[in-house]
C-alpha cells in the first residue's frame, strides 16, 4: 500500500510520522502565520500523542497550536475538534466537551468530531453513548482504521460489562478486523492482536485465539499478556497441564499476580491435584490476602478434600471481601444442602427475601438484582431437595411486597409442587395395567412437562390381558357372562380415555420422538384414538393434523367448533424466524429487486426477502425510516412493542432484530474469512 493510500484511510497521519512532524515544524517556523499549516502540524502531533506513545506532551503541544488558530478564527471546526481531542488525550473530558459542543453546532458531520465525542462518552462511563458516536464516526469515515479500532474496543468493553453476549463480541471482532485490515501503525498492531484473540476466546474460536496470542508472544513487551491468554485458551480446552505451564511463564514476569495464581489453583483443582491447588491458593493469598478468586478456589479444594467447615469459612470470607461474588455464594448454599442443613437454607432464603424491599431500586451496585440471583441460587438447591421444599418457598412469599420477587417464588413453588405430582404420576405410569384411567391420564396431562416422556410412552402400553385382569380386580368376579362383558367394556372405555389423555400429554411436550409416536398412532389406531393423536400433532402446529381434524369436523357438521378449538391449541405463528436464502434459490430482494448473485447474502421470512445492501441502507438512515405505529416486520412479524426498532424501506417494514441478523451474517462471514486466511 502506498503512503498516500495509507494516509487517505486514516484520520491522522501515521507514516514516517516523526519526519513528517519535523518537516511541518520547519515549514511552520518559516511561515508562522499560515493557519492551514498550523492545523496540519497540530493534527500530526495529536496523532502521535494518541496512537504512537506521545502521550500528554504531544496532546498539550497540539492544544497550544490550535488555540492560536482559534484566536484568529473561533469558528474553525477542525481546530475546535483537534482542541477537544487533545483534551480527551489529556483525560480532561469536561474541557474537551466545551470545544466539541461548538464544533457540533458548526459542522456535526465530521468523522473526527464523532470519534472525539465517542471517546469522551467512554471516559465518562457512558459506553452506550460512546458506541452511538463511534458508529456514526464509522459511517462518516468507513475506511479509517481509527474509527473501527475505537468502536471495536468499546464494543468489547460493553460486552465484558454485559457478560459477553455473543452478538456484541462478534460486532467488536468485525470492527477490530476492519482496523487490522487497514494497516494500522506497528504501535497499534500488538494491542489489536490481543483484542482479536480475546474476541476469539470469548466466541469459542480457540485455535484462532491461540494463533493470535502466539504471534503476540513474539513481542517482548506483550509476551506476559500473551502467556496469560494462552493459559486461558488451554484452560477452556480442558488442557489444564498446558494452562499451568503458560501461567507459569506469565508468573516469571509477575510472580505476585494473585488472580493468575488463583487460576493456577483452579487448573490443579480440575486435575484432581488438591494439595497443589491448596498450595497455589495460599501463594495467591500471600500476594493478596483479599483475593476473592483464591478464597473461592481454596474453598472448593477443601470441600473436595472432605473439610466442609473450612470450605464454608473460605466462602464466607470471599463474600465478606466481595458480596457480589456469586460462585462463592452458590458453593456455600450447595455445601449447606449437601450437609443436610435445610434450616440454614430456609433462614438464608427468608433473610434475602425479607431484606429485598429495603433495598433501593436502580442503585449503582444493582443490589436488588444481586438479591434475585441469590434467591435463585437457593431455589436451585431446594429443587434438588425435592417437593418437600415447596412449603419453605411458599412461606417466603409473604415476606416481600415486590411483585417480581413474589412471582419468582411462586413459580418456584409451583415447579416444586408439579415435581411432586409428576413423581407420583410417573410411578403409576410405570405400571399402566394396574393404574390406568382418566384420573391418571388427566394428572399426566396437567404435569406433562415434568413427567419424563419415556413414562408417558410406557403408560400407553395396555393390552387385552391388562384389561381382563383389571376387570376382575376392580369389579370383582361377575355372576354371569353379560355382567362380565359390561365390566370389560367399562374398562376398555377407561383405557381409551387414559390413552387419549396420554397422547395429548405427549403432544404438549413437542419433542421429535413424541411427534413420530403420534404419527404412528394417527395412522394405525382406531378412529377415536386417531383423533387424539391428530390433536396431539396439532399442538406441534402440524398443518396436516389440522386439516384432518377439520375434515372430520366437517363430516359431522361441527367445523366451527373444530376451528375454534384449533385456534385455542395451535401454537402462535405470528413470529417467524427469518432464514438465509441459499445461493441456488431463484429469488430477488423485495426492496430493491437485486438477484442473489448481485449481493453478498439475503434473508427471507414470510413473503419478503431483503438483501444485505438494503439492510446497510436502512442502518445508515434509521432516523428517517421509522415505520408506522401499527406496522409489523414483513420478515418475522414483530411489532414496535416486540422489537428495538421498526423501519420502512421501499414499502417493506423491517425490524431491528432482522437487521441485526443480516448484519451479523455479513460481519461473521468477513471475520471468518479473515481468520481463515490470517
Image (spheres, helix red, strand yellow):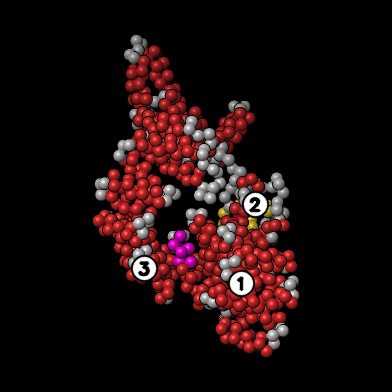
Q: Which residue is mark 3?
A: 254
Picture coordinates of residue 441 (x, y %)?
44, 28
Left or right: residue 170 versus residue 25 is: left
State the residue at coordinates (43%, 37%).
Answer: 351
Secondary structure at numbered mark 2? loop
State the residue at coordinates (44%, 43%).
Answer: 374
Q: Which residue is mark 2?
A: 645
Secondary structure at numbered mark 1? helix
Residue range corresponding to the magenta coloring: 195-202
User: Residue 32, located in which quarter of the rendered image?
Assistant: bottom right
Structural crowding at the residue carrying mark 1, measured as other residues with C-alpha within 10 Å and reported as few (<14), some (14–19) or many (≥20): many
Picture coordinates of residue 580 (x, y %)?
57, 57
Structural crowding at the residue carrying mark 2, measured as other residues with C-alpha within 10 Å and reported as few (<14), some (14–19) or many (≥20): some
- Residue 350 vertical position relative to residue 470 in the rendered view, above or below: below
Point out which mark residue 86 bears: 1
State the residue at coordinates (55%, 65%).
Answer: 152
Amino acid at each position: 500500500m502506498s503512503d498516500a493510500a495509507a494516509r487517505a484511510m486514516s484520520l491522522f497521519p501515521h507514516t514516517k510520522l516523526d519526519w513528517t512532524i519535523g518537516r511541518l515544524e520547519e515549514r511552520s517556523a518559516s511561515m508562522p502565520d499560515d493557519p492551514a499549516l498550523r492545523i496540519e502540524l497540530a493534527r500530526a502531533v495529536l496523532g502521535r500523542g494518541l496512537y504512537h506513545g506521545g502521550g500528554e506532551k504531544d496532546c498539550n503541544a497540539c492544544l497550544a497550536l490550535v488555540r492560536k488558530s482559534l484566536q484568529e478564527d473561533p469558528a474553525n471546526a477542525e481546530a475546535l475538534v483537534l482542541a477537544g481531542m487533545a483534551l480527551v488525550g489529556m483525560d480532561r473530558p469536561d474541557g474537551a466537551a466545551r470545544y466539541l459542543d461548538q464544533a457540533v453546532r458548526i459542522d456535526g458531520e465530521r468523522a473526527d468530531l464523532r470519534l472525539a465525542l465517542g471517546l469522551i462518552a467512554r471516559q465518562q462511563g457512558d459506553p452506550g453513548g460512546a458506541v452511538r458516536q463511534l458508529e456514526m464516526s464509522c459511517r462518516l469515515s468507513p475506511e479509517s482504521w481509527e474509527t473501527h479500532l475505537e468502536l471495536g474496543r468499546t464494543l468489547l468493553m460493553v460486552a465484558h460489562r454485559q457478560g459477553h453476549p455473543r452478538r456484541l463480541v462478534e460486532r467488536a471482532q468485525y470492527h477490530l478486523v476492519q482496523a487490522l485490515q487497514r494497516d494500522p501503525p506497528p504501535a497499534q498492531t500488538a494491542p489489536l492482536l490481543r483484542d482479536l484473540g480475546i474476541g476469539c476466546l470469548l466466541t469459542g474460536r480457540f485455535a484462532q485465539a491461540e494463533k493470535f496470542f502466539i504471534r503476540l508472544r513474539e513481542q517482548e513487551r506483550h509476551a506476559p499478556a500473551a502467556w496469560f491468554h494462552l493459559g486461558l485458551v488451554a484452560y477452556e480446552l480442558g488442557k489444564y497441564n498446558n494452562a499451568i505451564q503458560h501461567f507459569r511463564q506469565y508468573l516469571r514476569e509477575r510472580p505476585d499476580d494473585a488472580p493468575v495464581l488463583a487460576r493456577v489453583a483452579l487448573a490443579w483443582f480440575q486435575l484432581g491435584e488438591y494439595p497443589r491447588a491448596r498450595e497455589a491458593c495460599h501463594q495467591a493469598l500471600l500476594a493478596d490476602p483479599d483475593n476473592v478468586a483464591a478464597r473461592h478456589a481454596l474453598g472448593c479444594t477443601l470441600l473436595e478434600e472432605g473439610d466442609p467447615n473450612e470450605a464454608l469459612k473460605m466462602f464466607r470470607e470471599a463474600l465478606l471481601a466481595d458480596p457480589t461474588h456469586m460462585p462463592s455464594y452458590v458453593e456455600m448454599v450447595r455445601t449447606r444442602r449437601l450437609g443436610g442443613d435445610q434450616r440454614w437454607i430456609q433462614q438464608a432464603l427468608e433473610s434475602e427475601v425479607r431484606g429485598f424491599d429495603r433495598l433501593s431500586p436502580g442503585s449503582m451496585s444493582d443490589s436488588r438484582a444481586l438479591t434475585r440471583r441469590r434467591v435463585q441460587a437457593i431455589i436451585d438447591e431446594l429443587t434438588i431437595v425435592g417437593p418437600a421444599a415447596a412449603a419453605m418457598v411458599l412461606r417466603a412469599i409473604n415476606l416481600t411486597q415486590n411483585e417480581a420477587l413474589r412471582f419468582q417464588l411462586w413459580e418456584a413453588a409451583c415447579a416444586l409442587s408439579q415435581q411432586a405430582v409428576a413423581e407420583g404420576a410417573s410411578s403409576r405410569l410405570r405400571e399402566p395395567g394396574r393404574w390406568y384411567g382418566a384420573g391418571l391420564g388427566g394428572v399426566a396431562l396437567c404435569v406433562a412437562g415434568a413427567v419424563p416422556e419415556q413414562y408417558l410412552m410406557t403408560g400407553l402400553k395396555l393390552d387385552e390381558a391388562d384389561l381382563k385382569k383389571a376387570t376382575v380386580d376392580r369389579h370383582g368376579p361377575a355372576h354371569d357372562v353379560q355382567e362380565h362383558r359390561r365390566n370389560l367394556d367399562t374398562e376398555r372405555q377407561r383405557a381409551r380415555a387414559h390413552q387419549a389423555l396420554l397422547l395429548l400429554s405427549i403432544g404438549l411436550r413437542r419433542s421429535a420422538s413424541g411427534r413420530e409416536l403420534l404419527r404412528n398412532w394417527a395412522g394405525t389406531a382406531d378412529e377415536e384414538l386417531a383423533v387424539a393423536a391428530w390433536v396431539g400433532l396439532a399442538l406441534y402446529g402440524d398443518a396436516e393434523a389440522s386439516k384432518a381434524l377439520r375434515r372430520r369436523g366437517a363430516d359431522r357438521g361441527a367445523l366451527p367448533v373444530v376451528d375454534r378449538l384449533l385456534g385455542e391449541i395451535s401454537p402462535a405463528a405470528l413470529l417467524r424466524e427469518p432464514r438465509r436464502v441459499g445461493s441456488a434459490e431463484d429469488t430477488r430482494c423485495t426492496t430493491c429487486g437485486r438477484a442473489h448473485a448481485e449481493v453478498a447474502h439475503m434473508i427471507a421470512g414470510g413473503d419478503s426477502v431483503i438483501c444485505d445492501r438494503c439492510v446497510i441502507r436502512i442502518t445508515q438512515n434509521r432516523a428517517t425510516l421509522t415505520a408506522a405505529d401499527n406496522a409489523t416486520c414483513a420478515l418475522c412479524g414483530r411489532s414496535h412493542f416486540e422489537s428495538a426498532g421498526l423501519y420502512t424501506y421501499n414499502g417493506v417494514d423491517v425490524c431491528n432484530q432482522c437487521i441485526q441478523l443480516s448484519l451479523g451474517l455479513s460481519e461473521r462471514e468477513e471475520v471468518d474469512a479473515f481468520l481463515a486466511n490470517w
